[in-house]
Amino acid sequence: MINPPIIIFFFIVLFANAIEVIAGFGSVILAITFGAYFFSIQQLVSILVPLNLLLGMMVIFKYYREINFKQLFKRILLGTGLGMPIGIYLFNYAPSEIIKPMLGFLVLVLAAYELWAAYRLKEKPTPLVSWKAWLFLFSGGIVQGLYASGGPLVVYYSVREFENKSEMRSTLTALWLILNLVLLVSLLSSGKIDSESMKITCFMIPAVLLGFVVGDKLHHRVSEKSFRIFAYVLLLIAGTGLLVSKG
């Protein structure tokens, strides 16, 4: 018999995946934020990484022409790839009681500032200076290795760099696909993906498929300005989740 937490988590995964298809990020961080009421963080990462790979393959299969390969390979992947091994090491050996609240606070401050700026200035934010851009990408890689949720920091960089929301979505989806393949190997080799986590993962596959359909329809109905505001609101939610969640 399927227990109520699994049913609730199914709809959490559906919602989170729809959000990722709209924005290019958010499925893992949102699912971890709300799923932490039912599972530990390590369990959630083991369940969600394979699901995010499935979602990424579907988006890329349909929208690979929109990927900005120059931005992906010359900057974003390089910066996050350098930070990710550190995050994987911390995931395996370091407690998260200090790291997670610090990240949550940083994300909240960034998102709140950008929402305020968007309201007051009503203009697209300018690109980050080079050292700040690399810092956000490197830090995003560390967080990706820790929680498979480097999205907030990478999105802060990406919202300032990409002119087109569809290009941003497809490029970030390609990034998560590559990074999560590496993370999947690490989870398998460390034994963190087991038969129990795979059972839950398989049960959540329909939620990913439904989330893709819903998110893809909504993505084309959101204006560029609304998309940027929506991305920063997601950052606020993600930062709050990192501050208050346990495990």
Image (cartoon, rainbow, N blue to C red):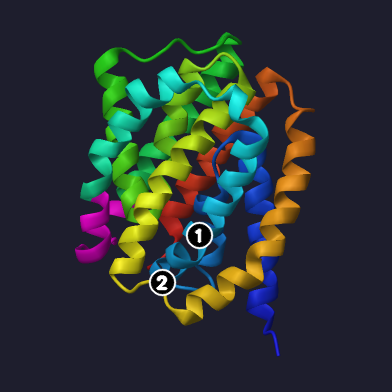
| x and y, in percent, of residue 82 in the image | 23, 37
The one nearer the camera, 212 or 228, is 212
Q: Earlier in the sequence, mark 2 or mark 1?
A: 1
Q: Which mark is residue 167?
A: none
Is residue 11 depicted above or below 133 in this figure? Answer: below
Is residue 41 depicted above or below 21 in this figure? Answer: below
| x and y, in percent, of residue 175 in the image | 44, 36
Is residue 55 depicted above or below 160 in this figure? Answer: below
Based on the picture, tell me whether residue 94 belongs to the magenta stretch.
yes
The one nearer the camera, 60 or 239, is 60
Based on the picture, tell me whether residue 198 belongs to the magenta stretch.
no
Residue at the disc numbered 2: 193
Q: Amino acid at mark 2?
A: Ile
Q: Is residue 228 visible?
A: no
The image quadrant where one finds the C terminus is bottom left
- Helix or strand or loop: what does disc 1 sit on? helix
What is the spatial separation of the Cα atoms under label 2 and label 1, in whole angstroms? 10 Å
The one nearer the camera, 5 or 246, is 5
What residue is drawn where x is 29% and y is 60%? 96
Q: Which mark is residue 50?
A: 1
Q: Are marks 2 and 1 in contact (CB under 8 Å)?
A: yes
**Is residue 29 found left or right of 226 in the rendered image?**
left
